[in-house]
């Protein structure tokens, strides 16, 4: 099983994560978000673990009451491949 992370869970990242999740030989380990916005709920509904896109953003998620699996570095340690869907 190929362990995949998606960096950037926006318009493109959502589609990529769903496409990866549909593959029988791949597993979504998690997705990153830069801020605790509406995309957090979408990731939770699909059962994707959520990671902060940067270490300095963890506090914003905690303040919003969002549980994180970690930050981007933690996701990178847990995957075989990352699909970068971040805008910058």
Image (tube, grey):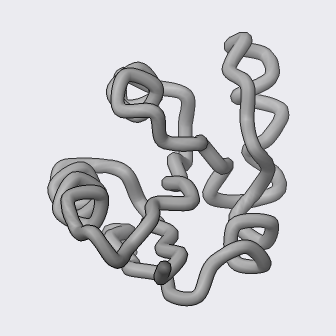
Q: Is residue 12 shown left or right of residue 7? A: left
Residue at image coords 46%, 60%: 28
- Name the side, left or right, on which 59 lies relative to 5: right
Residue 70, x across and y down, in percent: 79, 50
Residue 45 horizontal side relative to residue 50, left or right: left
At a point 38% along the width and 73% down the height, the residue shown is 26
Q: In which quarter of the view is residue 62 placed? A: top right
- In the image, residue 17 sits, relative to residue 10, either above or below, namely below
Residue at 83 percent across and 32 percent down: it is 59
- Figure quadrant of residue 45: top left
Q: Is residue 59 left or right of residue 61?
A: right
Extreme residue toward the top, this view: 65
Residue 8's place in the image compared with 60, above or below, is below
Q: Quadrant of residue 29?
A: bottom right
Q: Residue furthest bottom?
A: 80
Q: Could you tell me which residue is drawn at 80 percent across and 66 percent down?
A: 74
Q: Considering depth in this image, is 18 or 32 the residue closer to the camera?
A: 18
Seen in the picture, residue 8 relative to 83 is either above or below; the reply is above
Which of 6/63 is in front?
6
Q: Which quarter shows the C terminus?
A: bottom left
Q: How many marks?
A: 0
* Image x and y of residue 78, in percent: 73, 73
């Amino acid at each position: 099983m190929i362990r995949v992370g998606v960096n950037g869970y926006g318009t493109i990242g959502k589609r990529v994560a769903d496409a990866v999740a549909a593959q029988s030989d791949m597993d979504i380990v998690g997705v990153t978000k830069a801020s605790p916005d509406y995309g957090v709920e979408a990731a939770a509904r699909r059962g994707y673990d959520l990671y902060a896109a940067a270490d300095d953003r963890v506090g914003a998620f905690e303040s919003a009451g969002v549980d994180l699996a970690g930050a981007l570095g933690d996701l990178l340690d847990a995957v075989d491949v990352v699909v970068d869907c971040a805008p910058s």
